[in-house]
Amino acid sequence: MTPPATTAPSSAAPVPTDLDPTDPDPTALGDTAGVWEEVCHLDDLPRERGAAALVDGVQVALFRTHDDTVHALQQYDPYCGAHVLSRGIVGTRGDVPTVASPMYKQVFDLRTGACLDPVGREPVHLATYPVVVRDGVVLVGREPRHGSGPS
Amino acid sequence: MAMEPRGKAPHHLVVVGGGMVARRLVDALRARDGEGRWAVTLLCEERRAPYDRVALTSYFTGRDPEDLALGGQEIWDDPLVTIRRGVAATAIDRAARTVTTSDGRTLGYDSLVLATGSYAAVPPVPGHDLRGAFVYRTIDDVADLRSYVESLRGELDRPLRGAVVGGGLLGLEAAGALRALDVDATVVEFAPRLMPLQVDDGGGEALRRLIEGLGVSVRTGTATARLTDHLGRVARMHFADGPALDVDVVIFAVGVRPRDELARGAGLEVGERGGVVVDDACRTRDPAVWAIGEVACIGGRCLGLVSPGYAMAEVVADRLLGGEGTFPGADLSTKLKLLGVDVASFGDAFAQEPGALEVVVSDPVAGVYKKLVMSDDAKTLRGGILVGDASAYAALRPMVGRELGGDPVAHLLPEGATPAPTGDLPDDAAVCSCNNVSAGAIRCAVTEGGCTDLAGVKACTKAGTSCGSCLPLVKRLVTTELEKSGVAVSNALCEHFDLSRAQLFDVVRVQGLTSFSEIIAGHGRGRGCDICKPVIGSVLASLGTGHILDGERATLQDTNDHVMANLQKDGSYSVVPRIPGGEITPEGLLVIGQVAKDFGLYTKITGGQRIDLFGARIDQVPAIWKRLVDAGFESGHAYGKSLRTVKSCVGSTWCRFGVQDSVGLAIDLELRYRGLRSPHKLKLGVSGCARECAEARGKDVGVIATDNGWNLYVGGNGGFTPRHARLLAEDLDTETLVRTIDRFLMLYIRTADRLQRTAAWVEDYEGGLDAIRAVVLEDSLGIAGDLDAAMAAHVGSYEDEWAATLADPEKLRRFASFVNAPDEPDPSLAYVGERGQARPATPEEREGGAVLIAGTTLEVRP
């Protein structure tokens, strides 16, 4: 598999509306390529499963849900100390898209990184990364948002 | 003053005795004494921790004393509990509050509990002390009996003859032991009927017919006069009248006497017929000294059953913690299976109450005698006797003293003819008399304790954990209560499915569904989770609907099945090629060794007689398997809820003792069931003789060779709750054996819960092992042909899932380390050397900059 072409995204691209207002301004994508990294084609990600990626040398877990939304979380599982989260089972808790760690089965909200089931341990929330899918290309922001609990 | 470590507990309790009642006291005290006010020292004369004496006879079928271990052995690891095995108390100094022990030490106590139990009485007939005369009380007694019989059998070239003096409960147990040892047995009873304390003449007569039908001779109304010997060994029994009997072994089972000698020596009051006199709080005249169990003389008599002993233990535990508990009086109800014959007796079994009416159903052809004792208006149940079929016992006994409702005869009809009256069982009715658990306590465990299944209620209330006779009733109560409170979700798999795994299996099978999307759309909600997805992945795989990584199927798999390797703690995987039966050629060993060397893998022999290769990165796994598959290896499914291994001993090919080719059979079985997905992992074992070197009885399916074929055991496992497999069928030829295993496994796969191993499944299965035996051997449900066909389909459609994966580039994509850098190794993996191999570095080693070795990053292609 080859990494996707690295043409800089056009600043004319539609702005995703689900990004947090505190994110780096997506309209600036064109001239701040340092903020976003093109990772792969959407088709490279299996639906309802995760895949690991290196974003700026950091391990990130990407998940493509059944509606083709892509979420990015830290790949590092704080409960076991290994980089494995992309290998967990994707599902739902109520309406919340989730992943369960493959190691000790803690469950996390794919959207926020919040730990929804700490399996008897203290909840630890995960960092998330902004994701944009444009023209079938998945872009991941280099700056993580630090995790917080369910609101 | 105490010389034993007792932690910080302010008070020291010494318990003299190591029986079931002593054990119950320790359990009860530790369960309630949350603050740690009492440290306990248990003086246990036998060299074993307390064991299940009630099940002593099973020693002859299980052979292993471990089989008699009581649950919850972790109690002996409690820092406040000290058990001293093989140490007896020899004297009590009540003034100084000390106990002297047989190993010459002195122990101080704040409270002392005598739980010394009984010894077996031996009547003073001449010859009672000859070699070959035994009593029946402890594991050592039965072990001595067995070794005597086995050595005699080696000497004498004829069937052995035995006699039991005493036709009560213990005597019939002992006769069962003789039969299990293949010794002809005669039971000699002084009273005019068997079990004179529990059953009436009609019951005794039914019992005699049933027992004689099993080949045991019975002589009632017979007094043993003396035993005579031949060269010092018992050889003949003489009676007050009637002909003498030639015997090789005699067991005395005429009753027990309390072991009250310590109390006598300490000046404590003893009863007229022995036993330490206590009040209804189980306390002697000395407020620091208590007595419980068979040694206690309470209300003027000693009680030789375990359940009143348990009740006394609970009273003392309560009192030690400041409670006001009193002994509620003994329920002398009994239900036993003697020589395979059900006998139960409860309440006013002999209709001693004035005006009592007896309702009797007697069927000599079926070998059944049942009697209910009713009040004079025929409404209230007073007691009863059940011989030959005691299935009504669990439902009837709690109704003693209550209105039965309807025609009493209806309650005596065979099971199923009338529904058991459980729904309206009053809360204070005792359901489990061994552990004194009421119907209300069981209901409460569900409604307030949050228990949602039988196992939870058993753990929470202890109901059904001793003799187990009440389990059907407990199960019905739990189910009823759950349904009432709307918690019928106990069967639901997870929030996405209301069906249980077994129900889902049927739905998928009958409707021929083949995809998760169809299944969840039709029978569930949402998009699934880590509970239901692997279950459906497993169900689809069990039904043989294609490769586990085909299309959407891949999204259902836990990482182990997804990578087809076992995830380890650092995120790397281990790889296990199949080595059927544990048999491997030198060439095969060299291939595995070379692969391990080339990929820098740590190697270890598994418990299942194969080789595990650790430290493979996800991106290396296909390359490792390419090498293994090219050399002829297949997936070992170490990662799957599926058949793992069929372990074998060396067998008759090489072994001096083997009677059958265990390796050959193990290989055949492993090749037959390889790739079979199931609710939990499956392990099989085959031993070539009764020495059982393959430890087959620790497996889900264990096969042990006999001179005439194979014995088949099912439902064993190791792990957190070890279980010995139980005998399903004996002396099968190979074809019948394989067919029986086929059906057993398929029935399990179809009906077990998620992650339920065979042991728990057998226990939960309606009717238990007997019902399973009826299904797989007698086709009682008419599904045997269906089960056979399902297994035939599995065997016919098997393909090695690793070979199939290597041939499919689409499936191989998932092994990329990073979607944007498929061959870049996970930079976080780090290894250090230990004993000549790599192991994951600890966090400290990573932090401290220890010398890390290259580990699995070196792949040298030849």
Image: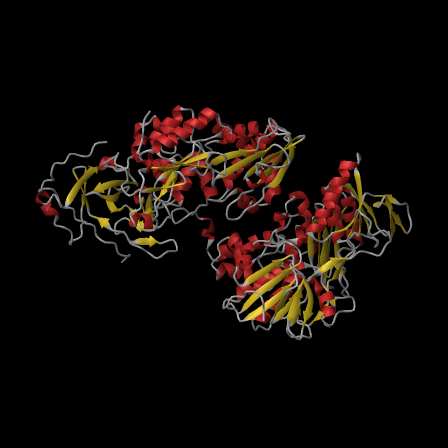
Q: Is residue A16 above or below residue B593?
A: below
The answer to whether residue B580 is left or right of residue A92 is right
Count of labels in the image: 0
Is residue B420 among the parts visible in the rendering?
yes
Residue B430 quadrant: bottom right
Give how far across and how far down residue A71 sits, in percent: 24, 45
Q: Is residue A149 above or below residue A29?
A: below
Residue A87 quadrant: top left
- Toward the viewer: B437 or B589? B589
Give how far across and how far down residue B2 sits, in percent: 58, 69
Is residue B799 among the parts visible in the rendering?
no
Quadrant the C terminus of chain B occupies:
top left
Q: Residue at x 47, y 51 (%)?
A: B490
Q: Residue at x 39, y 49 (%)?
A: B495
- Toward the viewer: B833 or B11? B833
- Toward the viewer: A121 or B466? A121
Quadrant the N terminus of chain B occupies:
bottom right
Q: Is residue B436 above or below residue B638?
A: below
The answer to whether residue B620 is left or right of residue A139 is right
Give how far across and how far down residue B98 sits, in percent: 64, 70
Give how far across and how far down residue B518 sits, in percent: 36, 38
